[in-house]
Every structure is written in C-alpha cells, then in structure tokens.
Image (cartoon, rainbow, N blue to C red):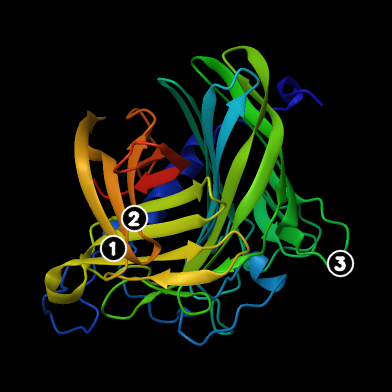
Amino acid sequence: MSLRSHPVSAGLTLLCALLLAACDPAPQTDRYGDGGPDAGRAGFAGLGAANDGYAHARPGTRLNFPGDHGPHPGFRIEWWYLTANLEDASGEPLGMQWTLFRQAQQPDTDTAPDPRAQPWATDQLWMAHMALSRGASHRVAERFARGTSRPRPQTARQAGVTAQPFRAWLDNWQLESLATDPTIDALSHLRLNARAEDAKGPFGYRLDLRAEGPLVRHGLEGFSQKSADGQGSMYYSQPFYRVHGEILLDGAQHTVTGRAWLDREWSSQLLSPTQTGWDWFSLHLNSGARVMAFRLRGGGDNNGDYYSGSWITPEGKVTPLKADTLKLEPLARAEVAGQTLPVRWRMTLPQQDLTLDIAARHPNRWMRTSVPYWEGAVTVKDATTGAPRGQGYLEMTGY
C-alpha cells in the first residue's frame, strides 16, 4: 500500500492543552519532605520527581518476555523508542525516529479511582513523536491521546500497547510484530507505519525491521542506574535491526535500507532531582559491535556527571560501561533553535582500545515538540586516523 493512502487524524487542540498541563508536574518540596537541598527540584521534564504509590525500578528485578514488551501501568513513565540510520537508492543518508510515550496520572492500585466510572475519565496519557531527516530538512510531528490502564469493554482505544500479539499505536501510527513463530521473540520482526503532514506537505515511512541478534539488557540484567543516589529504570534494547521499506518526503517516495535500534524503558523516577538532562548515544559500528552510552548532567559523585553504557559484541554479549571505562567529551558546539548544543563529541573506550569522534550529520535536528530536545543521526570516525567506524543516533535533552 502506498504511503500516500494513509489517513491523517484530526488535531485535538483542547486535548493537547490538557495533556501538556498534566505532563507538567507540580513543584515538589523535596523527596524527604524536610525542605532540604532538593526542595522545588524535579529534574529535567519532571523526571526527578518522587512519586509515592508508584512501582519503582530496582536491581534484581527479572525481565520477562514477551510480557515486558507491553505496558507497565504500575510505573509512572514508559517509552517504546525507535531510531534508524537509512539511505536511499542513491546512497544519500536519512534519519528517522518514532517514539510512543506513556505517562500514568495516578498510581494503579486497588484503591485508586476507577477511570471507567466516567466516560471522559483518564489515568493514562499517551504521546507519540515521529521525525524524518535528510540534509538540512528535518520534519517533525507529534500526537496525543488519552486512555486508561483498565480498558473499557468493547471500546477501541485510540492509543496503547499489547504484548501478545505485540502492537504499539496512536491513531494510525503503528509499530506491530510480524513474527508468527511463538518460539521467536515478538520484536524480532516488526513493521512500522506512520504518516503526518505539515506546511511543506505529507511525509512518513513504511518500514520492515528484522533483528539479526538478541535482545540486550543494560546495566544489572536490565536495571539501569541513573545517578549515584541509586534510582534508575528498567532498560533493554533490540539494537540489531536491518531495515528496508519506503519513505515519503518532498512529494516523492524513496526505497530505503539501513539499520535501526529499539529502546524499551520504564521507571517512576528516572532521574535525581538535580539532574538537568542527558546526552545519549546508540552506535552501530562497522565491526558489528554496538555501543549504548549516556552522560547524565549532574547526579554523579562529588556533584559531577553520571556516566553509564553498554558495549555489545556482534553476538549480543554485553559489557557494562562505567565512568572509568567510558569518557564522553564535547568537542564543538553550534547554535540550534536558540540553544548552544554540542554537535561533535569524542568517546573514549579504554577497554576496547577505541577513541571515536562522533559528529551530527546536520545540527538542524531540534525536535519542536511539547518537551523540546535534540535528536539526530551521527557519523562515527576513528579519532586518530579519521577512518569511518560506523554511524548511529544522538539524543540531547535539557539544553
């Protein structure tokens, strides 16, 4: 089916306003209630706010599949996050992103009010982002939906996720499993469809993703610590996708191929209250290895930054990266959307005897969404010789 035939849903201005208001957390006193140094702080986008009544990510928690591919309503925040480095038939590089976010509005407990009691009641907010980039062009769209953790009978949901069969959607934006063998992981074969329209016209993609390696658990078997205080998230990835499909951009359809990376993460307090944002990398190296790495600004020992990541072999074996085995250093900055952002980095991995220079393909990758951030494709080169070493994606928040 042509991408041109996909319908576009109508905007819901009032609903978006309500969702944005609900996503802006009220100022907190502090996590201990004593008016101490955390008073009035909630970290980037409220992700450092303490939330009594919600479940919390803990070390020792065991991931279970396919169940963990689905939603976790006991946790406050969650996402299904897909990025891809693509190229068209002429070899021109493109980048794409598709993300579905879930945010609970109240703890999912036996004593919580039942959101099914009123037709407009909701305890879950959904937000989806899509982006498609080529050269200086960066097209972005955002959608919102409302829902409940206890679906109303015989009611089609505007947004949601099911684990079996796996499907994540908001309106006609959809990521679904094509895996039919029950012995194969549901995320091993996916299809993504999304289309939007802005002042420049329609854009979108229809992509087929096949994994050539296993799921990867980050941190301590899936618990990813995010600060010296010990809080964090449950976090795993599928970084081994090969992609083929088509995109619609600037009035023309293009066949594309490439590599993709899917992140799954959920938490109720992702950051510490003093952390201002993060710089996150997902890299596909030419050797077949993958690298996930992040710097959280603040929250480290002695008021420094917090570093973590994963070195992933071509077979999927994971070596955790920490502050003494991972160094991230900004090398050059650019003015983007009124912000000064680091668009070239050096990553040093002493255990792997690698020093990499990582550069944005184009600085114009600002996501003008309700919570703005930078997200775009990067090139990876050897810091000494300048030889190509791979490609990937970079996300920067809190600038």
- Determine which residue is flagged by label 1: 26
* Residue at the right extreme, as displayed: 181
Disc 2 and disc 3 in contact, CB within 8 angstroms:
no
Q: Residue at x 39, y 59 (%)?
A: 293
Question: Label 2, label 3: how many angstroms apart (C-alpha)?
Answer: 41 Å
Label 1: state its secondary structure: loop
- Determine which residue is flagged by label 2: 24
Label 3: state its secondary structure: loop
Up the image or down, 20 lies above or below 301; here it is: above
Q: Residue at x 27, y 48 (%)?
A: 346
The foreground one among 354 and 226 is 354
N-term mark: 1 or 3: 1
Horizontal side of 360 relative to 172 (left or right) equals left
Q: Residue at x 45, y 80 (%)?
A: 56
Horizontal side of 182 relative to 284 (left or right) equals right
Res. 141 mark = none
Question: Label 1, label 2: how many angstroms apart (C-alpha)?
Answer: 7 Å
From the top left corner, tell me how far across and down residue 88 is, in percent.
Answer: 62, 23
- Determine which residue is flagged by label 3: 182
Label 3: few (<14), some or many (≥20) within 10 Å? few
From the top left corner, tell me how far across and down residue 122 is, in percent.
Answer: 56, 60
The foreground one among 106 and 206 is 206
Horizontal side of 298 relative to 287 (left or right) equals left
Residue 89: name its quadrant: top right
Label 2: state its secondary structure: loop
**Amino acid at circle 3:** Pro
N-term mark: 2 or 3: 2
The answer to whether residue 339 of the structure is visible from this angle is no
Question: Label 1, label 3: how many angstroms apart (C-alpha)?
Answer: 44 Å
Residue 336: name its quadrant: top left
